[in-house]
Amino acid sequence: MNSILSDRINQMEESATLAMAKKARELKAQGIDIISLSLGEPDFKTPKHIQEAAKASIDEGKYFAYPPVAGYQDLREAIAKKLKDDNQISEAKAENIVVSTGAKHSIANVFMCMINEGDEVVIFSPYWVSYAEIIKLAGGVPVLIQGNLENNFKATAAQLEEALTDKTKAIIYSSPCNPTGSVFSKEELEAIAAVVKRRENLFVIADEIYELINFTGKHASIASFPGMFERTITVNGFSKGYAMTGWRVGYICAPVFIAKACEKMQGQFTSGGTGIAQRAALAAILGDQNPSKKMEEAYLKRRDLVLGLLRDIPGVKTHVPEGAFYFFPDVTAFYGKSVEGYTVKSADDICLYLLEKANVSLVTGEAFGAPDCVRLSYAASEEDLIEALKRMKNALSQLK
Ligand code: PMP
Ligand code: GLU
């Protein structure tokens, strides 16, 4: 049947994060006691006032029709104001904002609008799984620049400079980063901005979806730097900071010509995001920010808990993540070790082994551009985290 399907879909990798989450769900359904630390999804409920706003908007009865393709005007204005107030992106106006069905969709719009066949996009790696596949779908070529454990997985401005060719159209990074939890400082981003500004027609896609889960207390938006607004597409959304993954609302702030292109694109693909979900997003942005702060505090507490437990497992090497809700430990110390005739050769093998032996699901680093690591999401209860790490320690200690 594959020959009936397009080359486009046959060549696409399945999302490794979603695939692992599906596998964990299936095993759970069979009655196996799986602890899933694979999906990057808050385990908190969407704050009550946001839920109430969505209910009220249904009762109002005004939001059942197709919304404007780029999003409701009041939501776009509120996002622009937030970007000015919180992110110092002083040029942001409603006309720069396009609201989409999640940040993933925002990113897809941007690449579909900007990439021609053969254009290169530099990805700061380790990177979130979907970037490379979306770039390829749009006809582009992902070019990876690699950070490693020693420099907290942060590729540098110098590496960027070296990777640029006359085909480079854009660069993309996430900060705080999925999968590493690393956060670019203002100085690191300034160095990246300086490289970008030396080149004509080079654009930055700054994925700031984990902005509200940042333990450094400092979030820098590259679009706020002098001369960078016209070069930057800031991507953000509600999934992580407001625990709203299922509502599917994300957005970009971009130069008007890019915003208009994305509006045209989604005018043909989705007709824009769900009306009720946009009313919920408006309440999230305008309402009490305390629930998000509380969630951030809880993630920090869990980060410290998991850090202690991971450091207690001989062979596991980790840095200290500064944001998001992931650990990205290196597992090379286990390569070549065996148990019951099974020899571990890769991080993929470690993930499979831990799934079968410890009933803990993680995602292999391979999917994130770092094949010697595994990703562990600590967006889970402390109880589950303690149990999962106990099981992992036990299973890994059996490898000799
Ligand atoms: N960017 C990053 C780095 C992510 O981890 C995610 C997680 N889903 C997204 C974008 C997309 O978020 P969403 O589509 O749920 O808004
Ligand atoms: N971003 C989350 C993750 O990395 C959710 C799944 C996805 O959209 O890939 O696990």
Image (spheres, rainbow, N blue to C red):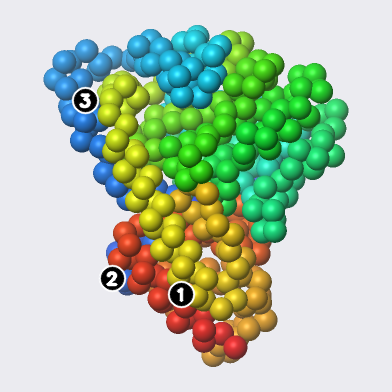
Q: Residue furthest left?
A: 59
Cβ–Cβ under 8 Å for marks 3 and 2:
no
Left or right, 61 with reference to 79: left
**Residue drawn at 81 percent across, 40 percent down:** 158
Q: Label for residue 392?
A: 1
**Which label sits in the foreground, 1 or 2?**
1
Cβ–Cβ below 8 Å for labels 1 and 3? no
In the image shown, does 72 or 391 lie closer to the viewer? 391
Say above or below: 163 vs 126.
Answer: above
Q: Secondary structure at mark 3?
A: helix
Find numbered disc 1 in the image and state the secondary structure of the residue it sits on. Answer: helix
Q: Which mark is residue 31?
A: 2
Front residue (pair 398, 84): 84
Residue underneath mark 3: 53
Instruction: Say what secondary structure mark 2 lies in.
Output: loop
- Discs 3/2, front: 3
Decide if residue 100 is in sight here: yes
Q: x, y percentage for residue 221?
A: 57, 28
- Could you tell whether 67 is left or right of 126 in the image? left
Q: Position of residue 211 (x, y in %)?
A: 48, 36
Indicate the amino acid at tag 3: Ala
